[in-house]
């Protein structure tokens, strides 16, 4: 039986970051790739069209809407297999980061296609790098939930994660979100707010949530635009867990549930019940 080799090359999917405001943030490599691929898969072809015309790049674009991304992904994979090179872009920043592209990259990876990044701007990374918060460990947790109850839990989990948390927020929800943050974690909760990064009205604000609410209420223009919120990890009250406290809790725990034991020990030692409970849970988890 004759063995027909298919000589056509397999294409590459380039995942290309674009600017988040300042067009000069596009990389030389991004421009080169965008100009050379056979097709650009874009979140919004009109939006990307403007970027391309700014840089005088003529290219075929293909719309990648979120609701039909799975079907579009299959089409893109077919083209890669036919040997076309494709660039994947979103409206701003790095594709897939709170943006479309996951279905495409996931399918292409599973199919063993060539997928390669052209890194560049990402609002989360830009924000945290200038926040003044610890960056040795951090988590990006996407957009804050739309509903108040879910949002309060989201903020609590963020500060209890043990690391800096970065999240995206929309201009319409920022005040409601900050009210929830204050209600859940208290008015002295520290927060860093980064707005309009790389643009004319770039603003960083660090302080308590109460101070941030005052700052944004004083000038409602400051609530507008694109923004990132960051929360530091809650400081653990290491003072609370003295050897004496530990011994007392261990004794009490044979007679009552841990939470109650912490309450009794805290009363006896003049410590905060919650801090003591959290400290012992944290220690046992380690
Ligand atoms: N893929 C993008 C990235 O890599 O940053 C994020 C896309 S997401 C749909 C849009 C959100 O990112 C905005 O609501 C805002 O929270 C954040 N964002 C985007 N550009 C920003 C900027 N220039 N300054 C501050 N936040 C920005």
Image (cartoon, rainbow, N blue to C red):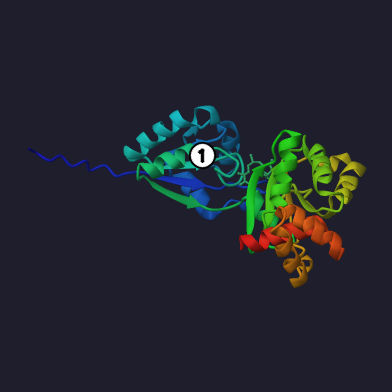
In the rendered image, the vertical position of residue 68 relative to residue 253, given as above or below? above
Q: x and y percent of residue 198 in the render? A: 71, 51
- Quarter of the image with the C terminus is bottom right
**Near-viewer residue (40 or 1):** 1
- Residue 39, located in which quarter of the rendered image? top left
Q: Residue at x 72, y 42 (%)?
A: 153
In the rendered image, the vertical position of residue 115 relative to residue 62, given as above or below? below
> What residue is disc 1 on?
101
- Side of 280 where 175 appears, left or right: right
Q: Residue at x 74, y 36 (%)?
A: 149
- Side of 22 where 1 appears, left or right: left
Quadrant containing ligand 1 reads top right
**Label 1: few (<14), some or many (≥20) within 10 Å?**
many
- Quarter of the image with the N terminus is top left
- Element type where label 1 sits in the image: loop
The residue sitting at the bottom extreme is: 243
**Near-viewer residue (149 or 8):** 149
In the rendered image, the vertical position of residue 245 relative to residue 9, given as above or below? below
Q: x and y percent of residue 73 in the render? A: 44, 34
Q: Is residue 133 visible?
A: no
The residue sitting at the left extreme is: 1
**Near-viewer residue (218 or 282):** 282
- Side of 120 where 227 appears, left or right: right
């Amino acid at each position: 039986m004759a063995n027909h080799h298919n000589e056509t090359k397999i294409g590459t999917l380039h995942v290309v970051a674009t600017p988040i405001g300042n067009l000069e943030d596009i990389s030389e490599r991004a421009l080169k790739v965008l100009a050379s691929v056979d097709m650009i898969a874009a979140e919004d072809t009109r939006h990307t069209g403007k970027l391309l015309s700014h840089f005088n790049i003529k290219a075929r674009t293909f719309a990648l809407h979120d609701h039909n991304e799975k079907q579009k992904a299959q089409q893109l994979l077919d083209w890669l297999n036919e040997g076309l090179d494709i660039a994947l872009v979103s409206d701003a920043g790095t594709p897939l980061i709170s943006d479309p592209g996951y279905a495409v990259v996931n399918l292409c990876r599973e199919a063993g296609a060539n997928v390669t990044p052209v890194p560049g701007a990402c609002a989360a990374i830009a924000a945290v790098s200038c926040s003044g918060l610890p960056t040795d460990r951090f988590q990006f947790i996407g957009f804050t939930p739309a509903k108040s109850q879910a949002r309060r839990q989201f903020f609590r989990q963020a500060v209890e994660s043990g690391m800096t948390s970065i999240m995206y927020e929309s201009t319409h929800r920022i005040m409601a979100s900050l009210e929830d943050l204050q209600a859940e974690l208290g008015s002295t909760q520290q927060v860093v707010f980064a707005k309009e990064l790389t643009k004319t009205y770039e603003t960083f604000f660090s302080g308590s949530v109460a101070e941030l609410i005052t700052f944004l209420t004083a000038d409602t223009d400051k609530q507008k635009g694109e923004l990132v919120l960051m929360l530091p990890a809650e400081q653990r009250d290491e003072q609370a867990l003295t050897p004496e406290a530990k011994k007392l809790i261990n004794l009490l725990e044979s007679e009552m549930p841990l939470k109650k034991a912490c309450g009794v020990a805290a009363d006896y030692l003049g410590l905060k019940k919650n801090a003591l409970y959290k400290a012992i849970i944290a220690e046992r988890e380690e």
